[in-house]
Amino acid sequence: MTGKHTGWFVTIDGPSGVGKSTTVKALHDHLTAQGRPALRTVEPTTSDLGQFLRSHADQIHGLALACLVAANRYEHIESEIQPALRAGELIISDRYLPSTLVLQRLDGVPLDFLLDVNRHALLPDLAVILTAEPELIAQRIATRGVTHRFHLDPSVPGREVEFYADAASHLTSQGVKVLLLDVGHVTPLEVARRIANAIPALPLASVIPPTHPTPQGT
């Protein structure tokens, strides 16, 4: 665990179309049914900077976008994540560092730059990375419709799956517990149960989760 806190920090990442937001909701509902309250959060955040990122992610590219994403993450850590952890809460983030190590690489940013600009970011206690066959992900994106400039490249689903595997390896090397789940042929509730089983039963404070917009590209 990084830093001094009594809470538990879970992140959920994965390729576009794999069902991150659906999984986060299913996990929150499952934990609530178990009497285990959790705070839901998201990146980009709902701050002014986070909303700017959401509305300009297709116009800003490369190093500039990577720096803005990192800035929003540090803001997120300071304003939401650390206070929740110090209060002994369970906090679940829809997207976090693994998404940066994938999406910004797709945008041509070198991995060493991404690791350097995010080197002060709080590491999660549990990093969940969802994956599926690239063909299935491509089908889901085609059904839902293009919501991000990366979706215009048919090679992206396969590259995302590969880069997320790299991100999982990096986090493991940093001592983070990583749960890599193939969600192609299981229900969101089944995925939620597997994640919940990996979260310790902490004496967490009661939390009323805020409502966040659905992250672009999930």
Image (cartoon, rainbow, N blue to C red):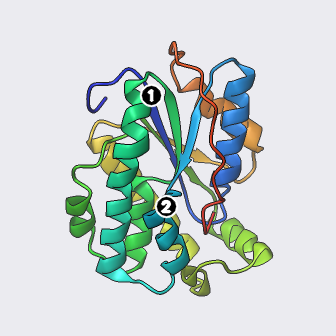
- Residue, disc 2: 44
Image location (x, y in percent) of residue 56: 50, 80
* Disc 1 secondary structure class: strand
Verify CB contact (< 8 Å) between mark 1 and mark 2: no
Q: CA distance from mark 1 to mark 2?
A: 20 Å
Answer few, some or many: residues within 10 Å of disc 1's Cα (few below 14, many 20 plus, some between 14 and 19).
many
Which of discs 1 and 2 lies nearer the camera? The answer is 2
Q: Nearer the viewer, residue 151 or 136?
A: 151
Amino acid type at image mark 2:
Pro
Q: Is residue 83 left or right of residue 186?
A: left
Image location (x, y in percent) of residue 115: 24, 60
Residue 12 appears in the picture as rendered: yes
Above or below — where is 97 with respect to 114? above
Q: Which mark is residue 191?
A: none
What residue lies at 26% left-to-right and 31% top-to-bottom? Answer: 3
- Residue, disc 1: 8
Image location (x, y in percent) of residue 206: 59, 21
Q: Nearer the viewer, residue 35 or 200?
A: 35
Q: Is residue 13 left or right of residue 73?
A: right
